[in-house]
Amino acid sequence: MVLIVVLVILVAAWVLFDLWLNREVVSEVRALNPGGDAGAALVVYHPGKSDFHHRVTAGFAEGLVSNGWRVEITTVSTQAPTDVSGYSLLVLGWPTYWFNPSLPVRKYLSRIGDIEKKNTVIICTAAGSPLNNCETMKNLVQAANGKIVKSLTLFTLRPNMVNGVNEPDKIAFHAGQEITLPRM
């Protein structure tokens, strides 16, 4: 009997913890560089429970801005824009939970439905190993008729090093600068 009670408590705790991790965070859409003429990007991300993913995503968005992009950025929620037709680029970001993309970003992609061959960047953050997390999201984006143009994975508990840069937000900034797509 005690074992069953302990098991029920552990399962309940796990479910509550998972709900807490995957809670949607609603934020307004912020426009960065509204006069940008290199293209329009929609950046939608799940911030997670630390500021790590937010810093990485903000760094990527600033990299796009420095390259002349008009960027609209918001968190994944039921209030995030699902009409992506007015954007040249869709950026999806999430932290890794249970070796999978966070539930809010997967639900958001389902709400969009057909991405209509939209150029898409995916930004995955993880503690030490995302396992197949990024591959899972690549498959989901491709199943939604999207085109992956960049995949970026950065870590909180292991070193990040790209072209001599080891700070995740700066790596993300440089990755954003690399995105050059034709205008719509």
Image (cartoon, rainbow, N blue to C red):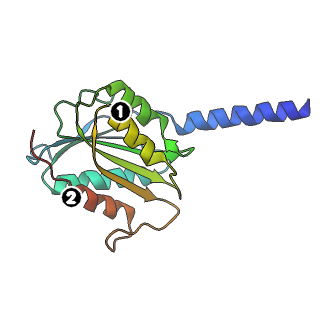
Tell me if residue 25 can be seen: no
Image height of 116 relative to 43, above or below? above
Say the numbered circle drawn on residue 177: 2
Report x, y in % for residue 98: 57, 44
Which one is nearer the viewer's eye here, 25 or 139? 139
Which of the two marks, 1 or 2, is nearer to us in this view? Answer: 1
In the image, residue 5 sits, relative to residue 39, either above or below, namely: above
Q: Let me know if residue 24 appears in the view.
A: yes
Q: What amino acid is found at the position of numbered circle 1 in the picture? A: Ala
Within 10 Å of disc 2 (Cα), the crowding (few <14, some 14-19, many 20+) is many
Circle number at residue 106: none
Instruction: Kindly identify the residue that appears in the image at 41 percent across and 36 percent down.
Output: 105
Q: Determine the secondary structure under disc 2.
A: helix
Structural distance between the alpha carbons of marks 1 and 2: 27 Å
| Up/down of 144 relative to 172, above or below | above
Q: Residues within 10 Å of mark 1 (few under 14, many from 20)?
A: few
Which residue matches tag 1?
Answer: 143
Residue at image coords 48%, 34%: 103
Rendered residue at 90%/33% (across/down): 2
Q: Earlier in the sequence, mark 1 or mark 2?
A: 1
Q: Secondary structure at mark 1?
A: helix
Quadrant in which the N terminus is drawn: top right
Please tell me which residue is depicted at 27% across the width and 58% down the height of the picture.
Answer: 175
Image quadrant assignment for residue 153:
bottom left
158 to the left or right of 114: right
